[in-house]
Image (cartoon, rainbow, N blue to C red):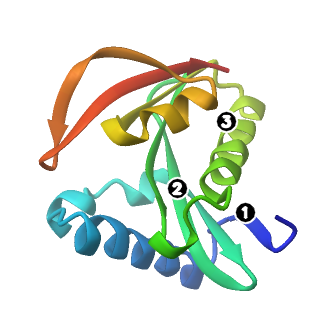
Amino acid sequence: MADILINEAIDPDDREACFSIRVEVFCTEQRVNRAIEFDGMDDQCRHYIATYKGNCVGTARTRQLNDTEVKFERIAVLREHRKNGIGRLLMARAISDATHAGYRQAVLNSQVHAGPFYEKLGFRFKGDVFFEAGIPHRSMSKKL
């Protein structure tokens, strides 16, 4: 865990690393169309990059929905680095920053298989299964 760092991706190279991880996980591995993955909202979002021993291995973004609500999106960890706590650390940083920024509610659309991961972080399911980019999802929320 000491070798894992979570930082805001402000530098253009860090942002490109975030985008590269998203392409690998969502476009290549899960076959999501690039036009869907890159939705034109990245400039409105706060991005995070996870590094392990100096290598970029995970990313997430947050997007303000209104004055009290934030949405966590594009949470991805490279396949060979999953199950090492990187996703949990990414989410912990994003949740902490959102809380400190004054948001009171967080939402996300979880791929159905990842729901238990988000439940462990305090998110609760709301609504039925729906398809996003051909993948089954469920909306989840958490009070901050």
Q: Vertical placement of 90 versus 103: above or below?
A: below
**Quarter of the rendering occupied by the N terminus:** bottom right
The span from disc 2 to disc 1 (Cα, nearest Å) is: 10 Å
Q: Residue at x 44, y 30 (%)?
A: 65
Q: Vertical placement of 45 versus 19: above or below?
A: above
Q: Residue 85: horizontal and vertical position, in percent?
A: 68, 55
Q: Mark 1 highlights which residue?
A: 6
- Residue 80 falls left or right of residue 129: right
Q: Residue 13: horizontal and vertical position, in percent?
A: 56, 85
The span from disc 3 to disc 2 (Cα, nearest Å) is: 13 Å
Q: Residue at x 44, y 74 (%)?
A: 21
| Count of residue discs | 3
The kind of residue on which mark 2 rests is Ala
Q: Residue at x 54, y 23 (%)?
A: 123
The kind of residue on which mark 1 rests is Ile
Give the mark nearest the N terminus, 3 or 1: 1
Q: Residue at x 17, y 29 (%)?
A: 130
Q: Mark 2 highlights which residue?
A: 60
Q: Mark 3 highlights which residue?
A: 98
Q: Residue 63: horizontal and vertical position, in percent?
A: 47, 42
Choose top left, top right, bottom left or bottom right for residue 2.
Answer: bottom right
Crowd rating for badge 3 (residues with CA inside 10 Å; few <14, some 14–19, many 20+) = many
Q: Secondary structure at mark 2?
A: strand
Q: Secondary structure at mark 3?
A: helix
Question: Would residue 111 be visible to someone looking at this image?
Answer: no
Give the mark nearest the N terminus, 3 or 2: 2
